[in-house]
Image: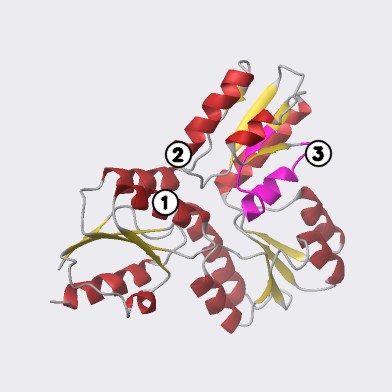
Amino acid sequence: MIVKLLNPQGYCKGVSNALDKIDKALLDSSLPRPIYLLGEIIHNQYIIDFYKKKGVILLPEGDKTKEEYLDEIETGTIIFQAHGSSPEAFDIATKKKLRIIDATCPYVNLIHKRIIDYHNNGYTIIYIGKKNHAETIASLKQVKNTNLVSTLEDINNLNIKSDKIYVTNQTTLSTIDLETIFTKIKEKYPKAIIDNKICDATTKRQLAVINQPTTDLCIVVGDKASSNSKRLFELASKKQKAIFVNCLADLKNYEFNNVRSVSITSGASTPFSLVLEIKEFLESLP
């Protein structure tokens, strides 16, 4: 079987940065215990389970907010997830003198800074993102009254009177869908400042899927909670036959009888080791 890996593969810089910080924290005996993950450090259950086995306590957003978790914690080290957190969460942890490790993606931090700066200069903020996604939740909490746009219909419901409008977005959206939303916002608010913040790792992966030569099957390796992985699957499915798997075990019962060529892409939070396991398995097939 012919197996082609679409580039890039492996962690993006934001994920590498976050995992490096948690690895160093686990090795640092001077840090107060327990060590908490405030929200999933990244959206990959394989990685989350790995760190839970090492004694890290996960505080999953959904059961409670990050702020509610922090209200209950009196001691320990708090690792803030890569997707970002609210200013209030940082304030609570600081006031309670908890040890803080900020693993927020630098690119997400830049978006938050721009949201705050434009808001302070009198701009109304429109944020394009998936509702209830961790990155979106954090970005909406940077300033009050941020307008969330998740669909084209949401734009019709906007009622902004000011010409001073700043528009930015979640870093892991579909580049194609995002451009469509930007265009419609610009039609409604011609003076709006559009600041496209799709991250480079997301863009490169999506373009690799869009521009790949057609194969019998495209395998997308990633966690179902990973926004950028889901976007890759959506794009791949529009082009050809595609399946979405988390790891090799998901392929054990798949029928490859009529498959002679396979392309593999993966999300920015997918360990490359999982991709290589799948590649080696496929190459072992007749």
Which amino acid lies under the numbered mark 2 shown in the image of this protein? Answer: Thr
Q: Residue at x 32, y 80 (%)?
A: 253
Q: Are marks 3 and 1 in contact (CB under 8 Å)?
A: no
Task: Give the structural element (helix, strand or loop) at label 3.
Answer: loop
What whole-number distance in Å separates the C-alpha atoms at marks 3 and 1? 33 Å
Tell me: residue 210, above or below residue 27: above
| Residue 128 magenta | yes
Residue at point 69% right, 50% down? 137
- Residue 76 on image: x %, y %: 76, 73
Disc 1 is placed on an element classified as helix
Identify the magenta region: 126-145
Q: Where is mark 1, residue-wise? A: 234
Direction from residue 102 to residue 145 in the image, left or right: right
3 vs 2, front mark = 2
202 relative to 258 in the view: left or right: right
Picture coordinates of residue 80, whole percent (x, y): 67, 60
